[in-house]
Image (cartoon, grey):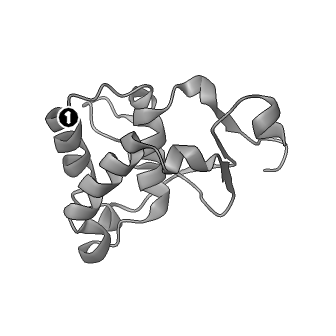
Amino acid sequence: EKLAREDKVYGYMVVSKEDKAVVKGLWNTTKAYLDTYGVQPTFLSKHMDQKGAWNRDMYYTNFEVSRLDFWRSDKYRQFFAWIDKARGIYHHRWGDAPIHLLAVAILLPESKVMRFSEIA
């Protein structure tokens, strides 16, 4: 209800860091996607280190609320198809949490994302 009332698309509770071992190659794959499709991330810079690389932030997805139209959108489906084609989900155990953060921070305006701070 709160997500809809405030016209948000994605809501999360906590941001944490993913272990290096299970995101091997995810950032390089994501960069290749951005370069190939000329995508300009909306607020990914908030999740980057001083060297310009993704800092392994992830939404802790044991609690997340979102509008299904985001996950069904052509932009998200294109991004996920690129990630899936790289086979890192199967070979390196890339999980939904880092993929969700990257997709949200690349494709959605930050104003459409909310943190449920009253729950955490």
Q: Position of residue 101 (x, y in %)?
A: 47, 46
Classify the position of the N terminus by image quarter. top right
Answer few, some or many: residues within 10 Å of disc 1's Cα (few below 14, many 20 plus, some between 14 and 19).
few
Q: Position of residue 115 (x, y in %)?
A: 70, 39
Q: Nearer the viewer, residue 8 or 73?
A: 73
Circle 1 residue: 37
Rendered view: 100 above or below 88: above
Rendered view: 24 above or below 15: below
Q: Quadrant of residue 69?
A: top right
Rendered view: 97 above or below 37: below
Q: Nearer the viewer, residue 20 or 77?
A: 77
Q: SS of the residue at dot 1?
A: helix
Q: Quadrant of residue 98?
A: bottom left
Rendered view: 62 above or below 112: below
Q: Residue furthest bottom?
A: 90
Name which residue type carries label 1.
Tyr
